[in-house]
Image (cartoon, grey):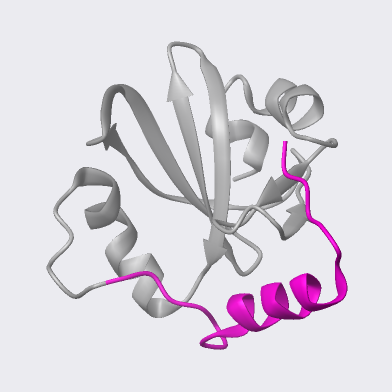
Amino acid sequence: MLLRDIHDDMERYLEYDCYCPGEIYDASGFFFQVFKADEECKELYRGVDFRNPEETVITVLCRNQLINFWVRGDKITEAERYDATENNIRIMPFAISGALSAGEKLDEFKPGETKKNLDEILGIADAVLIS
């Protein structure tokens, strides 16, 4: 399956709604990877977001990343990516549906890597602006 096959709005979203075409950021909001509509992927989960019942979340595995796409009506409104660890693949449906067990959390391929990279960036920057 290709990313474009996941939802009718995928090509428009990747081209026009990402900060730059195809950029999908991680949960920190700092680090991105570029994805294209013709990339191979596998849909893992589709369900209502427990935090906002008006939105559906579609989780796909693309390359070595899990990507959640939030859909409202016929439009994709947001996307966020996570490392596709065995743990994250297993618990993502529970996180989306609000049924995550106490103590379970998403993890990284290399534990602490995001924090380490953020600390390095902030250590050399006088200021960081996020819009």
- Is residue 111 magenta-colored? yes
Q: Quadrant of residue 36?
A: top right
Q: Quadrant of the N terminus?
A: top right
> For the point 49% across and 12% down, which residue is it?
74
Residue at screen point 69% across, 47% down: 24
Q: Position of residue 23 (x, y in %)?
A: 77, 45
Magenta residues (range): 105-131
Quarter containing the C terminus = top right
Where does the image place residue 68, in percent across and percent down from the top left? 49, 45
Q: Is residue 116 left or right of residue 82?
A: right
Q: Is residue 56 above or below residue 89?
A: above
Image-based side of 59 in relation to 25, left or right? left
Q: How many marks?
A: 0
- Determine the image quadrant of residue 64: bottom right
Rendered residue at 65%/43% (across/down): 2
Q: Residue at x 59, y 59 (%)?
A: 28
**Rendering coords of residue 98 (x, y %):** 18, 48
- Of residue 72 and residue 3, the one placed in the foreground of this image is 72
Residue 125 relative to residue 32: left or right? right
Task: Note whether 84 is above or below 10 in the view shown.
Answer: below
Percent coordinates x, y for residue 32 in the rendering: 74, 56
In magenta stretch: residue 43: no
83 displayed left or right of 51 = right
The answer to whether 79 is drawn above or below residue 73 in the figure is below
Q: Nearer the viewer, residue 14 or 61?
A: 14
